[in-house]
Image: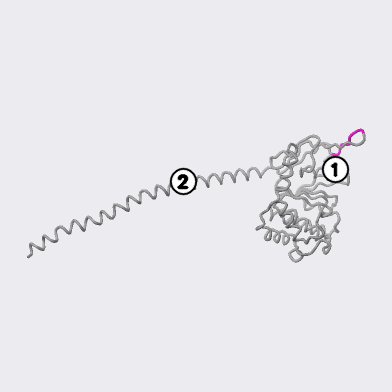
Amino acid sequence: MMRWLRKEKLPKQPEEAHIPEDVDDHPAEGALENPHLESSEAAAVQEENLGKATEQAAQQEKESGPILHVKEVRRSFPVGGGEIEVLKGINMEVLPGQLVMLRGRSGSGKTTLLNMLGGLDQPTSGEIWFRDQPLHKLSDEKRTVLRRDQIGFIFQAYALLPLLSAWENVELSLRMAGVPSHEWKQRVTHCLELVGLGKRMFHRPFEMSGGEQQRVAIAKAIAHRPKLLLADEPTANLDSQMGAQVMAVFKNIIHTEQVTICMTTHDPTILEVADHVYEMVDGKFVE
C-alpha cells in the first residue's frame, strides 16, 4: 500500500515543477519583443521632440533680431517735369516688442515711410527687411499676403464700417484674413475686452466717442494676430486724456499679444511711453 502511494507521488513532483517553468517561458519571450518595440517608438518620439525643440530655438533666435531693418531708403515722386525727393537715405531698426515712434511735422515724410514699412509702397532705392523678408523685392501679390497675415494697420480716420457694430467690424477683419470661423467668437470678444470695450461691443461707430472708435480700430487691427502694427497718427483726433488711453492700450497689447508697434505722431506729450523715437525733418532722421 505504501509502495503504491509512492509510485503515484513520484511522477507528480516533476510535473508540478515543470508546469511553472513552461508558463514562465512564454511571457519572457513576449516581454523581450514589447520592450524592443517600445524602445523604438520612444526613440522616434524623442527624435521628433528634439527636432521640434531645435526648430523652436531657431525661430526664437531668428525673432531675437530686428523685426524691421531699413537700409538707405530713398523715395522720389515725379512732379511736373522733375522729381521731388521725400525720403533721403533712411536707416532704422525696430526690435520685437518695441513701441517705436516716428515724430515730425506734417510733410516730413513720416507717412510715406510708414507706407513702405507696411509694403503699401516701394522705395525708389534702398532695402526694407521685414522678418528676413525683402519687402523691397517682393511682388505685389506676395506683399499683399504678407500684409494680410503678419501686419496690422491703424489709420487716423479709424476706417470702420459705419453700419456695422464694433463686434461686426472686428469679425470682418477675421473673415478677410481667412481665420477659421470657429475661432471668431472667442477672438473678437478677447480683442474688444483687451481694449476696454467689453460692454460696448454691439454699438455702432456713430454711437461711440472718438477714443472708443480708435480702440475698435485697434481691436480690428490685432484680431488676426499680426507681428507688426503700423499706426498713422492714432491720437491726432483725440484730446490728451483719450490719447493717453490709446497709448495705454498700445503698451498693454505689446505684452499680451507679443506685437511690435511703429507709429507716427507730432504729439510731444506721448513720446515718453516710446521705446525709441526717430525725429524726422525734411525726409531725414536727425539727432
Residue occupied by mark 1: 109
Image quarter of the N terminus: bottom left
Residue 84 belongs to magenta span: yes
Answer whether residue 96 is visible to the viewer in this image: yes
**Highlighted magenta segment, given as a residue range:** 81-86
Answer whether residue 99 is visible to the viewer in this image: no
Occupied quadrant, residue 219: bottom right
Pinpoint residue 10: horizontal percent, then vertical percent: 14, 58
Q: Is residue 139 above or below residue 214?
A: above
Task: Name the outermost residue toward the right.
Answer: 80
Q: What label sits on residue 43 in the rendered view? A: 2
Pinpoint residue 200: horizontal percent, then vertical percent: 77, 65
Q: What label sits on residue 122 in the rendered view? A: none
The answer to whether mark 2 and mark 1 are in CB contact below 8 A is no
Of residues 45 and 4, which is closer to you in this image? Answer: 4
Pinpoint residue 29: horizontal percent, then vertical percent: 32, 50
Of residues 143 and 247, which is closer to you in this image? Answer: 143
Looking at numbered disc 2 in the image, what kind of residue is underneath it? Answer: Ala
Residue that appears at 65% across and 42% down: 62
Task: Name the outermost residue toward the bottom.
Answer: 199
Nearer the observer, disc 2 or disc 1? 2
